[in-house]
Image (spheres, rainbow, N blue to C red):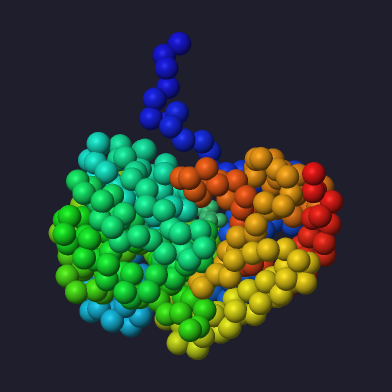
Amino acid sequence: MPQPSARTAGFTDSVIRRMTRVCLETGAVNLSQGFPDFDPPAALIETLKQAAGGTEHHYAITWGAQTFREALAAKQSRFMGIDLDPEQHIVVTCGSTEAMMAAMMTVVDPGDKVVVFSPFYENYGADAILSGAEPVYVPLDPHTDQFDPDQLDKAARGAKAIIVCNPSNPTGKVFTPQELQTIAQVAHRHDLFAITDEVYEHIVFPPHRHTYLATLPGMWDRTLTCGSLSKTYSITGWRLGYVIAPRHLTEITRKVHDFLTVGAPAPLQEAAVTALRFPPAYYQQLLATYNAKRDLLLDGLDRLGITHNTPQGAYYVLVDISGYGYQDDLEFCEDLAAKVGVGAVPGSSFFREPVNHLIRLHFAKRDETLHAALERLADMPTLRR
Ligand code: GLN
């Protein structure tokens, strides 16, 4: 038999998405893969129905339907404080998963080094391998979540790009303007592209504030900003994401995207224009909702004596399981699902370093679901060995 590709041997299927399947098999409350169990805003469902009865059932323009790009440019210009041109600066993709892959393929050649902070969202590892890049990891301090600028500088020597997930999945770290300034200086010094994953841009808990790396002096020309509608409008299944970049980069990203997927779903782009035109109050409400869910989960964990970090943004929390006597966090998560009835993601799927004492839960769930999960987590001590 011929051998399948060697490059695919370098990574496994996604552990995050595998844990959702484990939850389905075991009936566990799924706090693993980060997606809501509540509906998107009613206005969006309405426009989706209208889109179904409309005329947009065939390919949109490959880099995004005109109306969608216009609405997205207007919304992101407002939040980013940059005057974005829908004709030049936007490539609409099938989720930010494709956006990240297309951004990588835009700037990286086989053999190039790409700087990644560890822990990191697991897709970046596979993105790097699939595009032939070699990741170079810069650890975030486990206690402070900060990076060492000298270590970053060293890692960036001879690299082609840096990936910045802000707010960070899985730690919930929100990079400060000073940290982003340091990253920008390193990018200039070593002539790097920056690829950002900013899908949690609207889930940043005060007093923390979101800063877009592309808005720092001199960064626009070398940054590909990846984003998505999935988390902001609770429509993870619609698969709508985008790359925002200057024209000399979007020209290339458009080509990559065209041959990867041709385009994001046309009727869904049409329907989502409504969301992109939501007033500022929508984003305040979204944040208030997630702030309350964060408090619900964290207070519940505190009451149960379960040790955890405090996320500054995004909707994940890392729980410390070092007292449980497990060497393997995947095994812990399998037991947690089967015996306690709660789905979590093993922390090791996010770390370059041999870290096995953390699991990731998320709180993008209805309050009833979070209460049910907490009730079950009261049994977590039974897993102690
Ligand atoms: N970002 C989500 C998570 O980390 C999942 C997204 C996905 O599975 N595509 O759980």
Residue at horizontal 78 percent and vertical 67 percent from the top: 304
Instruction: Please indicate whether residue 207 sits to the left or right of residue 330 in the image.
Output: left
Residue at horizontal 38 percent and vertical 44 percent from the top: 127
Percent across and percent down for residue 7 are 38, 30
Instruction: Please indicate whether residue 244 sits to the left or right of residue 269 in the image.
Output: left
Residue at horizontal 25 percent and vertical 36 percent from the top: 110
Between residues 34 and 64, which one lies in front from this camera angle? 34
Q: Quadrant of the C terminus?
A: top right
Q: Does residue 302 sit above or below 187 in this rendering? A: below
Percent across and percent down for residue 11 are 46, 35
Q: Quadrant of the N terminus?
A: top left
The answer to which quarter of the image holds residue 276 is bottom left
Percent across and percent down for residue 22 are 70, 44
Residue 47 appearing in the image: no
Percent across and percent down for residue 317 are 60, 64
Q: Does residue 329 sit above or below 146 in this rendering? A: above
Between residues 323 and 206, which one lies in front from this camera angle? 323
Q: Residue furthest top?
A: 1
Q: Does residue 333 sit above or below 220 in this rendering? A: above
Residue at horizontal 45 percent and vertical 28 percent from the top: 9
